[in-house]
Image (spheres, rainbow, N blue to C red):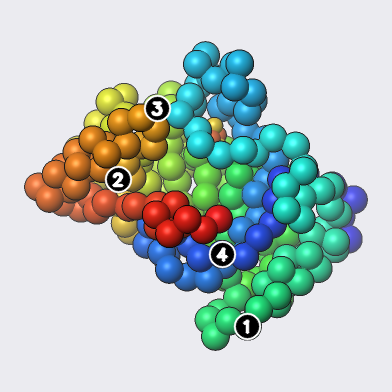
Amino acid sequence: MSKIMFKIKEIFKSIQGEGFLSGSPAVFVRFSGCNLWNGMSVNKSNAICNFCDTDFVGVDGQNGGNYNLSELLKKIDKVWNLNNSLTRKFVILTGGEPMLQVTNQLVEHLKKQGYFVAIETNGTIESNINFDWVCVSPKNLNLWKLLKGDELKVIYPQYKFDLNSLKKLSFKYFFLQPMDGNKKQTNIWNTINYCKSHKPWFPSFQLHKSLNIS
Ligand code: SF4
């Protein structure tokens, strides 16, 4: 077993609230840290990504901690087994930026344990790891390197991205997700209106927030 220690903010079971796999029960593993913002509110306005709505700092969340590979695998299984699920075992590696920490070994072991393994990444780090599902949500055009995957999810509006060019990239599904914050309602309507007349873009809403579940 590897000696790598994973810094994990939280691990919990919920339903995927966004994108193509919305509604699927999953274990969420939130990795600590991001390469586009240090997570401190005092630095947010100057960060490369400055509209983040996630707390990914430290290891103090539900089931958070510093885990070695074996401990992390056991904890993920324990959380999945907390209640019965009729669906395939499903784990979503998220953050922060999970690519900073996720290893091939972790993914292969999760697959051996029967998991469908998805990752949600900002796309700044290329990887040869064989995930079952890759969701890229870019935040910076110059730093974006991972240009293919299963779903592309663009937070809308972000005028630095030319959506017409992006739809030529190698993704199966293209989602626009309204930016949260004080213009959220306007962003929701603008997202819906854009998607109505621009294939293949499809709106993605954060169901978990509407349903008030984590
Ligand atoms: S890239 Fe993602 S995790 Fe990092 S600051 Fe932006 S929204 Fe948050």
- Name the foreground residue: 158 vs 56: 56
The disc label shown at residue 141, or none: 3
Q: Which image quarter is the N terminus in? A: bottom right
Residue lying furthest left: 197
Structural distance between the alpha carbons of marks 2 and 4: 22 Å
Per the image, the residue denoted by label 4 is 14
Residue 28 vs 175, above or below: the answer is: below
**Of the residues tagged 2 and 4, which is closer to the observer?**
4
Figure quadrant of residue 154? top left
State the count of labels. Answer: 4
Dot 2 and dot 4 residues touching (CB under 8 Å): no
| Residue at image coords 56%, 64% | 14
Q: Is residue 23 left or right of residue 184?
A: right
| Residue at image coords 84%, 47% | 66
Q: The residue tagged with tag 1: helix, strand or loop?
A: loop
Per the image, the residue denoted by label 1 is 84
Per the image, the residue denoted by label 2 is 176
